[in-house]
């Protein structure tokens, strides 16, 4: 299970800039859904509300109106049914990689030998078994984010929520992590909702792309690429990739999709 | 072939890295220079107005042999240690709560800020009325002086904890108390340790003040009595002891800090020294 539904979700807040009160519609009647096992990308220019939508789904921010449900249960605050991967990994600097993964599990109530075994298994899944005793500052940016992914996956959530998880990484690391994410998805079948501002990333990874602008859903597109996608380098060379990328680009720039 | 090998070993040995002087050596040189300077110029001063290292050493030795020193030191340390430890035990939780909970901060924050600036010396006579002249009043003066820097630093540290780290706790459904203990407390440790360090100096001053004002006892009494007898060399002995004690405590705290928060030194890149 792992189905997410956004129903008329709005989020407003007031912002005071130089004594002038602005009413900001961070989210304006957002509707979309993520099916079980699906990967959906939220894309849009900065300030379009994509991160706010993710935070509302996680329960870190409340919505002003509307509702988000995960497997039919309305979201009120955080829960173990959702695992969050933060933009800059946000590992606890005083804990080792393994202890960081264990932290999430402990919060779920796991204790004893099972705790360590599970954490080790998930670190192995992201390829960091040999670095489990390193502290975050001894890990590279890509490794930190792997630990972040392992920490979120370890609690076995029905949905993985990712906030621009590869945005702060260099191009090569990003590409290898994208491939690994698809690999992890193939193995675990997790539902994934992720935020990105990278067109290529959205098309390469997602099954569907939700294009957002000024707090509204502008367009929802299906990516016509089969799974498993295999070598992402080859996928980049296909006509479907180029076409979908162009459509998303169009939607981001003027909202009009060229007819074919 | 042998030539090449020789050359290779030579070239690797060639750029000999000049090792910088270790910290302790620089400190020792600094202290030695100060002592020599003081010894040379201190001898020209009338012994009532000043003293010099060798005279201090003699005074220290005589004082030590008379057994007075050990008694005075033990007397002072008892109230110092108890007051200081109490300040740590009480100050940290108060700081954590003030930093973490808005209501607590709004309700009690001003007292802590005001208390930090409170001229405690002026309150000692009042404390004596309440608590008498003995051990209790000395402990409470030390406690009150040390409490506020620890408390304020902890409070400040909590407000500087990155919001995202707290959100990590929230997103894994950690209860407030667990977030406080397992995220806020470790993230605040460097600030807490800085507060504990600042408190050493204030606690030493508080201890001497308390000994001046209340029952004349401990190292404070030695200072007062020798000053009254114009025995300047003996007067300096407890002063120097207190300064050395503060330095010792400071490095002890630094050692403890590296033990309880090793990641901090590593992140700051100071772990190689």
Image (tube, coloured by chain):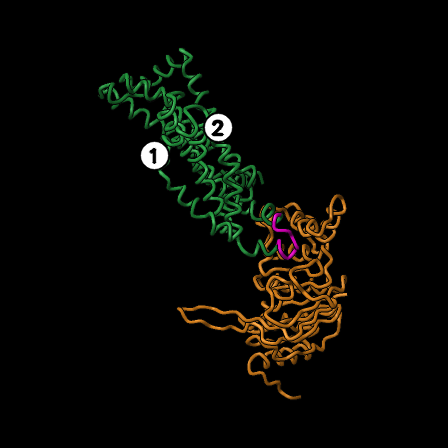
Chain colours: A orange, B green
**In the image, which disc is placed on residue B42?**
none
Provide residue B116's location: percent of width, then percent of height.
40, 41
- Mark linked to residue B122: 1
Q: Is residue A140 above or below residue B122?
A: below
Determine crowd level at label 2: few under 14, some 14-19, many 20+ residues with C-alpha closer than 10 A: some
Could you tell me which chain the residue with mark 1 belongs to? B
Q: Give coordinates of residue A190: x percent, y percent.
A: 74, 64
Q: Secondary structure at mark 1?
A: helix
Give me the chain letter of mark 2. B
Q: Residue at x 70, y 54 (%)?
A: A127
The residue segment tinted magenta is B169-177
* Residue name at image x 45 percent, y 31 percent: B140
Task: Kindly report the distance in space between the C-alpha atoms of the residues bearing marks 2 and 1.
Answer: 23 Å
Residue B81 disc label: 2
Q: Position of residue A192 (x, y in %)?
A: 69, 66
Q: Looking at the image, which is closer to me, A35 or B179?
A: B179
């Amino acid at each position: 299970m792992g189905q997410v539904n956004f129903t008329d979700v709005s989020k407003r807040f007031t912002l005071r800039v130089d004594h002038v009160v602005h009413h900001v519609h961070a989210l304006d009647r957002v509707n979309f859904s993520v099916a079980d096992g699906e990967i959906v990308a939220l894309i849009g220019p900065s300030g379009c509300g994509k991160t706010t939508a993710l935070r509302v789904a996680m329960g870190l921010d409340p919505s002003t109106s509307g509702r988000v449900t995960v497997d039919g249960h309305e979201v009120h605050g955080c829960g173990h049914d959702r695992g969050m991967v933060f933009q800059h990994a946000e590992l606890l600097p005083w804990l080792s990689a393994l202890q960081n993964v264990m932290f999430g599990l402990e919060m779920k109530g796991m204790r004893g030998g099972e705790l360590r075994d599970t954490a080790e298994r998930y670190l192995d899944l992201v390829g960091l078994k040999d670095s489990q005793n390193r502290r975050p500052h001894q890990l590279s940016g890509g490794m930190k984010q792997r630990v972040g992914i392992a920490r979120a996956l370890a609690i076995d959530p029905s949905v993985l929520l990712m906030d621009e998880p590869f945005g702060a990484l260099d191009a090569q690391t990003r590409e290898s992590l994208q491939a690994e994410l698809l690999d992890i998805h193939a193995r675990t079948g997790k539902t994934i909702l992720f935020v990105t501002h990278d067109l290529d990333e959205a098309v390469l990874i997602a099954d569907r792309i939700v294009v957002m602008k000024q707090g509204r859903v502008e367009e929802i597109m299906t990516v016509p690429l089969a799974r498993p996608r295999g070598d992402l380098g080859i996928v980049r060379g296909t006509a479907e990739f180029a076409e979908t990328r162009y459509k998303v680009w169009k939607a981001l720039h003027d909202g009009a999709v060229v007819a074919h | 072939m042998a030539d090449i090998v020789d050359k290779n070993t030579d070239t690797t040995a060639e750029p000999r890295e000049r090792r910088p002087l270790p910290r302790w050596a620089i400190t020792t040189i600094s202290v030695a220079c100060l002592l020599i300077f003081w010894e040379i110029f201190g001898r020209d001063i009338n012994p009532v107005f000043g003293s010099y290292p060798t005279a201090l050493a003699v005074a220290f030795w005589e004082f030590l042999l008379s057994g007075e020193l050990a008694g005075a030191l033990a007397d002072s340390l008892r109230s110092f240690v108890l007051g200081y430890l109490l300040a740590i035990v009480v100050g940290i939780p108060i700081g954590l709560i003030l930093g973490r909970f808005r209501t607590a901060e709004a309700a009690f924050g001003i007292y802590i800020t005001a208390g930090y600036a409170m001229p405690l010396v002026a309150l000692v006579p009042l404390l004596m009325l309440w608590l008498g002249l003995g051990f209790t009043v000395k402990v409470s003066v030390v406690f009150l002086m040390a409490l506020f820097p620890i408390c304020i630093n902890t409070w400040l540290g909590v407000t500087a904890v990155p919001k995202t780290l707290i959100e990590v706790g929230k997103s894994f459904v950690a209860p407030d108390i667990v977030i406080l203990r397992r995220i806020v407390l470790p993230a605040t440790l460097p600030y807490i340790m800085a507060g504990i360090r600042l408190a050493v100096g204030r606690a030493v001053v508080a201890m001497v003040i308390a000994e001046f004002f209340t029952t004349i006892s401990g190292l404070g009494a030695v200072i007062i009595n020798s000053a009254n007898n114009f025995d300047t060399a003996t007067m300096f002995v407890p002063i120097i002891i207190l300064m050395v004690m503060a330095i010792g405590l400071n490095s002890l705290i630094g050692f403890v800090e590296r033990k309880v928060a090793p990641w901090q030194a590593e992140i700051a890149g100071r772990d190689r020294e």
